[in-house]
Amino acid sequence: MSISPTLFSRSFIIFSIIAALLLMLLPLPQWLQWYLPQWVPLILIYWAIALPHRLSIGSAWITGLLIDVLNGTSLGEHALALTVITFIAVKWHRQFRMFPLLQQMLVVCFLIWLYLVLLFLIQGLQGYPMNNWIYWISIVTTTLCWPLAFFVLQGYQHRFKIN
């Protein structure tokens, strides 16, 4: 009995998102938490540009709700932020794929910045403003992790013929 290619593709995408959620939950010292890359948005951005027909805005919304539940934050804040950046990535996926790696890193930097700005605004409106500059440091670490994530996921995508 063989698994259909469509089912395998979806399963692998879901597995990679779950792996990113687990990386987000790593128990690290508080000072190191700020430097942890934003793995979930990074993985969603990759799949949105690589296979926009497989990753929907609804997938980003559900993933964001999972993050809200796992983090104990207000329901919908991560969902909204992930939906916005996924929508942009899907909308511009053709152009994004044509960019060299350095330009892709700049776009990823912008998308992660937008993600954090949306979270910043939502939390600020709720009365939890972030007054620490270190909140923004994950933009740098996530951008620097883009080549690693891109080549690893692209390698698995080609190896397992995920399309």
Image (cartoon, rainbow, N blue to C red):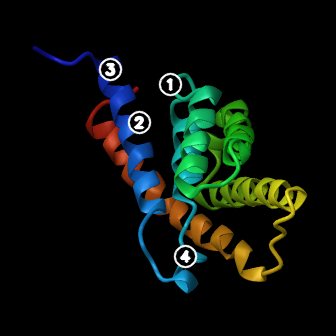
Q: Find the distance from the CA under tag 2 to the CA under tag 4.
A: 25 Å
Q: Residue at x 60, y 40 (%)?
A: 65
**Kind of residue at badge 4:** Gln
Asked whether disc 2 touches disc 1, contact meaning CB atoms under 8 Å apart, the reply is: yes
Q: Are marks 3 and 2 in contact (CB under 8 Å)?
A: no
Q: CA distance from mark 3 to mark 4?
A: 35 Å
In what element is the residue under mark 2? helix
Kindly state the secondary structure of the residue where label 1 is placed: loop
Q: Position of residue 27 (x, y in %)?
A: 42, 72
**Tag shown at residue 33:** 4
Q: Which residue is mark 2?
A: 13
Residue 142, numbered label:
none
- Residue 86 lies, in percent from the top left, at 66, 39
Q: Which residue is mark 3?
A: 7
Q: Quadrant of residue 59?
A: top right
Quick check: marks 2 and 4 in contact, CB under 8 Å? Answer: no
Q: How would you rate the neighbour count of disc 4 (Cα within 10 Å): few for under 14, some for 14-19, many for 20 or more? A: some
Residue type beneath disc 3: Leu
* For marks 2 and 1 on the same chain, the one whose residue lies earlier in the sequence: 2
Give the residue type that dot 2 points to: Ile
